[in-house]
Amino acid sequence: MNILGIESSCDDTCAAVVRDGRVLVSNCIASSAAEQNLYGGVVPEIASRRHIEHISQVARAALNEAGLPLDGIDAVAVTYAPGLIGALLVGLNFAKGLAFAAKKPLVPVHHLRGHIAALYLTHPALEPPFLCLVASGGHSHIVQVQDYTHFKVLGRTVDDAAGEAFDKVARTLGLGYPGGPAVSKAAESGDPHAYALPTPHVEGAYNVSFSGLKTAVLNLVNRARMQGQEICVPDMAASFQYRITEILAEKLLAAARDTRAQQICLAGGVAANGLLRETLSAGAKKLGAALYLPARSLCGDNAAMVAAQGYYEYKAGHTAGLSLNGLATLSIEEG
Ligand code: KG4
Ligand code: ZN
């Protein structure tokens, strides 16, 4: 079964074809990230406009690369929640039009379920149940993936998402947007123990909090500037990356230990982070659990992950009519 996936929840306009939820056939992306960098972060209105300009070409490219006519696909899967509402609506309305014109089923996909499905494209033998940390620009969840369409959130951020913290620290350090890759790059030549950054206290065994950590970086930078000193950017980037990684890894591994998870996974944009991947590899080995990481190329937003999850949603009977609406927020459990 060939599924055309469409994704436009943030600043990437994406279309892809995936076969039977597991085989990546084509994967096309037009990103407005470089333009968003001029403004230090995502401007929702700019994201929506660029989606409108790019969506038809990107979808056509995905079909062309797959060597398929529109009639060669069996369903259209689309991210309908959560995300920037104006951005989501562009992909959603495009997908509706395409499904209607081609007389194919329309399959709604929750964005975070999509991120998790990137793992199925990377690891053909991976099957639920598993425990997964989904860390992106908008969410940080520790999720029990019970089966392909049933999820239980064990922990979440009580304030900023992990990716958002990377982006804000990058802005404070003058490193540009998106912040994750920039902080990670700067950290390569830094000392992770140069600055002692706090581990914020948070209620709930598997919840995380990053707003205090971000503020600690901001305060250190401001204090140094007021005293006429310069902060060492690589050292601060490395110290921040070290601390946030420790927090995420500790909570995920505690949840894995307590639930006796045999399989631990990582997903979302932050899953591309090298230190987080290494730290979790070592931690999972100690627990005796298998660790599955998504291919780096599939960590950030893409439509292959949407098409992959779309396959399992379709098999579970989750299709929608043309009245389907986009939602800015929606729990992964309900999605
Ligand atoms: O999943 P994603 O592409 O979009 C959302 O759904 O939000 O995640 C984007 C987030 C951004 O905050 C970006 O800074 C972060 O993922 N990110 C990283 C890395 N690459 C992207 N964070 C840490 N290290 C990275 N290498
Ligand atoms: Zn995402």
Image: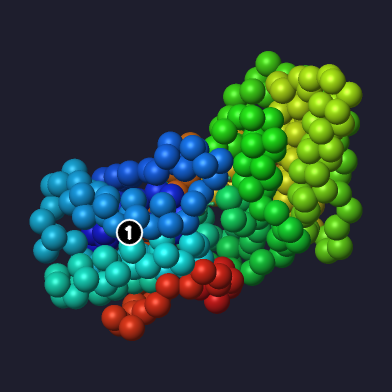
Residue 167: quadrant of the picture: top right
Say which of 185 and 33 sits in front: 33
Residue at left offset 80%, top offset 31%: 221
Which quarter of the rendering shows the N terminus?
bottom left
41 relative to 15 in the view: left or right = right
Give the crowd class for mark 1: few <14, some 14-19, many >=20 residues within 10 Å: many
Using the rendered image of the protein, determine whether residue 85 is visible from the camera's viewpoint. yes
Vertical position of residue 149 compared to residue 3: above or below = below
Position of 1 with respect to 335 (left or right) is: left
Residue at the spot 42% in from the left edge and 68% down from the top edge:
80
Residue tagged by mark 1? 6
Residue 163: percent from left, percent from top:
62, 46
Question: Given the image, on which type of amino acid does mark 1 rest?
Answer: Ile
Q: What x and y, as percent, mark residue 318? A: 38, 77
Where's residue 315, x and y in %? 36, 72
Q: Quadrant of residue 311?
A: bottom left
Q: Nearer the viewer, residue 123 or 273?
A: 273
- Name above or below for residue 322 compared with residue 297: below
